[in-house]
Image (cartoon, helix red, strand yellow):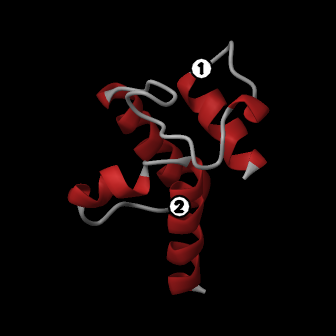
Amino acid sequence: MADLKAQIIQQLNLQEVKPEDIGNDQPLFREGLGLDSIDALELIVLLQQHHGIRIANPEDGPNIFYSVRTMAEYITAEKAKTA
């Protein structure tokens, strides 16, 4: 998950944040890391560029992007479907 955290930091240009500052289960939005809707779009781009994954149902976004762990689980599940 450290790689995913580094990708998130780079994609969102979070210069003050280190991978170890982000908890695996810490919410990414609101009270957690404090991301907003623009950041959500950037995370969608990250999935597409780094992992070749497109989100089929936009309503799944809040569950996918809840935390680093939920993102990692989604990436793993999607890659397993294509393997």
Q: Identify the residue at image location x=57%, y=31%.
A: 11
Task: Mark 1 or mark 2: name the one nearer the start of the chain.
Answer: 1
Count of marks overlaid on the render: 2
Residue 71 x/y as whole percent: 52, 56
**How packed is label 2: few (under 14 Cα within 10 Å), some, or many (20 or more)?**
few
Residues 27 and 47: in front is 27
Tell whether 55 sits left or right of 21.
Answer: left
SS type, badge 2: loop
Residue 15 x/y as whole percent: 67, 14
Q: Quadrant of the C terminus?
A: bottom right
Amino acid marked by disc 2: Gly
Q: Identify the residue at image location x=32%, y=50%.
A: 62
Tell me the quarter of the picture where residue 79 sits.
bottom right
- The answer for how far apart the CA atoms under marks 1 and 2 are is 21 Å
Q: Nearer the viewer, mark 1 or mark 2?
A: 1
Amino acid marked by disc 1: Asn
SS type, badge 1: loop
Residue 38 x/y as whole percent: 34, 26
Residue 3 x/y as whole percent: 75, 47
Q: Which mark is residue 52?
A: 2
On screen, residue 20 above or below 55: above
Tell me the quarter of the picture where residue 18 sits.
top right
Tell whether 5 sits left or right of 54.
Answer: right
Q: Which residue corresponds to mark 1?
A: 13
On screen, residue 6 above or below 47: above
